[in-house]
Amino acid sequence: MRFSIVALFAFLFGSCQPSTDGMSVVPSDEFAQFITKAGVQLLDVRTPSEFEEGHIEGAIMIDYRTDPDGFLQKAEAQLQKDRPVALYCRGGRRSHSAAEILFKAGFKQLVELEGGILAWQEAGKPLK
């Protein structure tokens, strides 16, 4: 029984920790702390209209949905590969796809917002 409880906690909370391969998905509170660190690049991968409806302060927008093929080229022009990138979308799917592309292209540390901007709002976090 004790092993089962330990295994359950490891499963539930293990995904919230930075991964060893440079990619991780974290909840809103941890994401909010992470984006305050020096050198973190904050990336919103939603569409321009979604971005205008409200975004996390300090985010740059590179639309993944409209032009997934041109996404990497734009990201490489605007972001530094050796600095951490914190990224989000509406619900988490686009940011995950975008993170995989960035990781394969050599970006070193990628942190995704679990549940996207919807989870951010549910947690009562501010938007600009």
Image: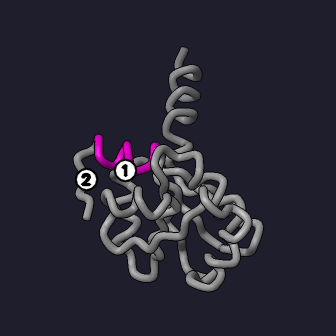
Check the image and report above or below for 35 versus 96.
below
Q: Which residues are magenta?
A: 115-122
**Residue at the image point whose x is 39% and y is 68% from the top:** 35
**Where's residue 55, x and y in %?**
34, 62
Q: Which residue is mark 2?
A: 125
Q: Quadrant of the N terminus?
A: top right
Measured in 3D between alpha carbons, the distance from the residue under mark 2 to the one under mark 1, in whole angstroms, is 8 Å
| Mark 2 neighbour density, 10 Å: few (under 14) some (14–19) many (20 or more) | few
**Where's residue 40, x and y in %?**
46, 76
Check the image and report above or below for 23 versus 57.
above
Q: Which residue is mark 1?
A: 28
Q: Amino acid at mark 2?
A: Lys
Left or right of residue 103: residue 5: left
**Where's residue 5, x and y in %?**
51, 22
**Where's residue 28, x and y in %?**
37, 50
What element does badge 2 sit on? loop
Q: Earlier in the sequence, mark 2 or mark 1?
A: 1
Mark 2 in CB contact with mark 1 (< 8 angstroms): yes
**Residue at the image point whose x is 52% and y is 56% from the top:** 112
Name the outermost residue toward the right: 104
- Assess whether residue 120 is covered by the magenta stretch: yes
